[in-house]
Image: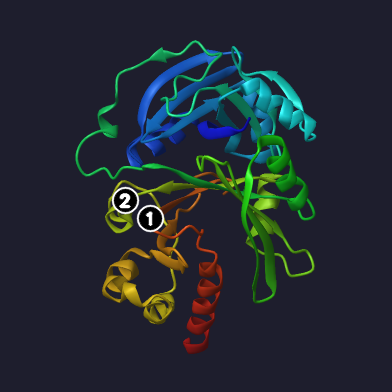
Amino acid sequence: MTAHDVEYLELYASDQKTTVDYFVSSFGFTEAARASADGKDSVLLRQGGIQLVIASGPATEGFLAEHGDGVADIAFACEDADAVRAGALAAGGRSYGDGGPGAPVVSGFGAVRHTLVQRPAGTAPGLPGGRPWVVGATPAAATGPGVPVLRALDHIAVCLDAGTLHDVVRYYLDGFGFDQFYSEYVAVGEQAMDSIVVRSPSGGITFTIIEPDVTKKPGQIDEFLKRNGGGGAQHLAFLVDEIVPAVLEFQHRGVEFLQTPDTYYDVLADRIPRLEAEIADLRKTNVLADRDEWGYLLQLFTRSPFERRTLFFELIQRQGAQGFGSSNIRALYEAVERARSVAP
């Protein structure tokens, strides 16, 4: 038996009110319920097929002190939670008891755990178990026209300490029945990293798992690992239908996105000719583009809203492409180098 979907993601937040407001006011999530138990105050947020639990309180303080704000639990929906638990333990995982009635908890990567929720594929997720949820009214800020919809969680990017990538990948293949989608070694200038993508057979769970090449100079992965106190979820990628209007609206609502060097767009039409008519809009919004044998994708990353600059987010629009924009790492590097070469 395998896990088939992400049931919910639980984020530990040092400032719960500010974090909830970020997702509701800026990204258009709806507050669905609140709960308080076992030293943890929890707020459940929903949008599209995404459920986020924002938690704070004494039970979260150890994680926050060591890792900063970030994902502590990625709950998996399973046809048979006990069978998935047995598979994870047989593959070397650890058990952490139960996260609610019939919801065993097992180790994941770094300090991230997986609560295994019994839910047949094709049925809607419910309230996370084991907490006395109080369902509340929908806040006005989360509704209304002009709010782009985050359709689904496209993938979760995971950064690991060097030398652990293949062991972690094997754990998800053997313990959860995931498939290896592809692997790639990306070298840019004097930095490099190894990446492997694993995915549940249903396609509902996708991890892009990355480790730095320590024979090269330290780069952004090393910086994340230092800030995060080890491996963890680096970013969550949200699927949107049309990224340009989504970026414009979310910017208006206070989301800060990374800036793209203007020189990146000077050669974009050569890289992806079909996008020539859209380059002006992409340049205006800093949106990146990539292609593979199936099509192309558009993507843009936010700045981390957290003090330690740990977790951040991505918007992604897929036009057939099944990749994750790895060519943009190299394209951005080359754009920066072109900008430096022409600078006075």
**x then y, percent, for residue 215:** 79, 68
Res 61 quadrant in image = top right
Classify residue 144 as left or right of residue 272.
left
**x then y, percent, for residue 267:** 41, 81
Is residue 199 at all visible to an observer of this figure? yes
Q: Residue 208 carries which label?
A: none
Mark 2 burial class by Cα count in 10 Å: few <14, some 14-19, many 20+: some
Residue displayed at 42% across by 56% down: 257
**x then y, percent, for residue 327:** 53, 69
Q: What residue type is labelled 2?
A: Asp
- Marked residue nearer the N-terminal end (1 or 2): 2
**The one of 116 and 18 positioned closer to us in this rendering:** 116
Q: Residue 317 carries which label?
A: 1
Classify residue 284 as left or right of residue 307.
left
Residue where numbered disc 2 is placed:
241
Q: Which residue lies furthest to the left in this view?
A: 145
SS at badge 1: strand
50, above or below 86, in the image: below
Q: Which amino acid does label 1 sit on?
A: Gln
The figure's colour scheme reads: rainbow
Res 260 quadrant in image = bottom left
57, above or below 253, in the image: above
SS at badge 2: loop
Is residue 230 at all visible to an observer of this figure? no
Query: Mark 1 to mark 2: distance in Å?
Result: 6 Å
Mark 1 burial class by Cα count in 10 Å: few <14, some 14-19, many 20+: many
**x then y, percent, for residue 218:** 71, 65
- The N terminus lies in quadrant: top right
In the rendered structure, are the residues bearing label 1 and label 2 in contact, judged by CB atoms less than 8 Å apart?
yes
Residue displayed at 31% across by 46% down: 253
300, above or below 160, in the image: below
